[in-house]
Amino acid sequence: MTFPLTLLDLAGAIALLLWGSHMVQTGVQRAFGPQLKSILGGALNSRFLAFFAGVGVTALLQSSTATGLMTAGFAASGVVDLAPALAVMLGANVGTTLIVQAMSFNVAALSPCLVLVGVVLFRRDSSTRTRDLGRAVIGLGLMFLALRQLLEIMTVYEDTPSLRVILGAVSTEPLVDVILAAGLTWAAHSSVAVILFIMSLAARGAVPPDAAYALVLGANLGAAINPVIEGPAGDDPAARRLPVGNLLTRVVGGACALAFLYPVGRFMVAFQPDDARSVADFHMFFNLAVAAVFFPLLTPYAWLLRKMFPPRVDAADPSRPIYLDPAAREMPIVALGAAAREALRLADLLQEMLAGAIDALKKGDRRLIAQIRRRNGPIDRLEDAIEAYLTGLDAGELGADDHRRLKEILTFSSNIAQAADVLARNLLPAASKHLKRIGAIPEPLQSELFAMMERLGGNLRTAGSLFMTADARVAHLLTD
């Protein structure tokens, strides 16, 4: 078999592994996403609970990135302190090791059974949650199947000269291994899949143990690079504290482990003779060691990160989104929450516009009225940004409740923008014309304008409450 076909087989098996992981994540996210987010939010009051919540949520979602996105949302809003948010990330990194440990056993034989059970759950039950769980079980079966294929591929091609030359070249320099695995993990957006691939290489002796351990260090580093590169929405440096803090823990831990790689490698080989299991154990011990070192230091570490990334003090462009994090699109429940927060900010801008309009009319100042009218532009641009963000989500990853919430956010944002248009293009121009002609607004018209704006302000507050609570009693207030 030619070398190009060897790479094609490897790429196909890795793609299947990635897709299976994606199905597990989205299935669990759809079935239990709100509950997991609630558990995580409640645990952030204590760094100890936050650590174990990070472990558990990541083990279920099979993605430390997804856990990090939820945590970043809490931290960016100021709801929780930075130290427990960092504790969640330490726990999330440990949570990925549980997944790898489970996959390190001989579980490939379970793949047909899991796919069968998943298909039955997905097709035979009308319950949305059951279908989502079926999707997750199918994904787990595909992951097991991909692992078996990787092992078979490495068995068939382990003596291929071209493959041996490439693997031999990258195995001679640990730093090259780290960089290679970090880049691969960043591209794949899954440290679990990359480490499982490294385990398959080690299981067939394609790479020596020390090289496999260096590749594991690179996979841990690569998992923390993507959130930093994509970055949170907005230009507030404070929003970068959590992703950068998580990356720095990996960099420091990885550098120390790389410096002592050879003695640690000898210990791991003696501790666990099975090469594949040895890779999984090294991954677990590394993350446990990083957590043990940094956990007692979280308070001064959080202080250092706050010094490195102080909050922005300059006034931001009101039309620039603050909460629409591009990285959050990987997890719809987080993306929808970000869009909802941005929509409420849109309502705040209209409320400020209304207050300014009333003040300008009372003063009879045409120049001030013109300034208030220009505030409609940022509202329109922000509404466009919210719409573009939501329509850019993958519809296939949205459940029925997610689709309903998406429509609610779009409708709310659109209504806010329309109200601002009416104020800027109809009410205020009419008042400005009267001021230009006769120097004052007639009393009957002035009273009518004030009453209309006050009612609009009241409806705006009620609509915001309904948007957040979905309480039928609040809905009745709008219809009265």
Image (cartoon, rainbow, N blue to C red):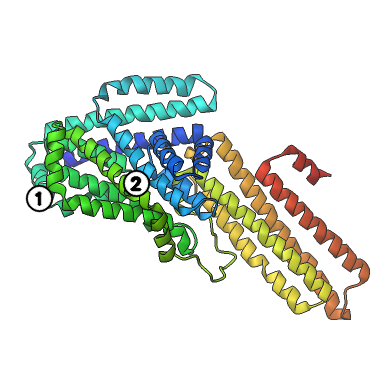
When the figure is inspected, residue 176 is found, relative to residue 114, above or below; the finding is: below
Whether tag 1 and tag 2 are in contact, CB under 8 A, the answer is no
**Is 415 located above or below residue 132 in the figure?**
below
Mark 1, other Cα within 10 Å: few <14 / some 14–19 / many ≥20: some
The location of residue 350, given as percent across then percent down, is 69, 61
Q: Position of residue 276 (x, y in %)?
A: 19, 33
Task: State which quadrant residue 419 falls in.
Answer: bottom right
Image position of 208 (left or right of 197):
left
> In what element is the residue under mark 2?
loop
Count neighbours of disc 2 (C-alpha within 10 A) and say few if under 14, some if 14 to 19, many if 20 or more.
many
Relative height, residue 118 to residue 298 (above, below): above
Question: Disc 1 to disc 2, how far (Cα)?
Answer: 26 Å
Question: What residue do we see at 67% from left, 59% from top?
Answer: 348
Query: Which residue matches tag 1?
Result: 172
Residue 273 coordinates in the image, percent (x, y)? 13, 32
* Residue 189: assigned label: 2
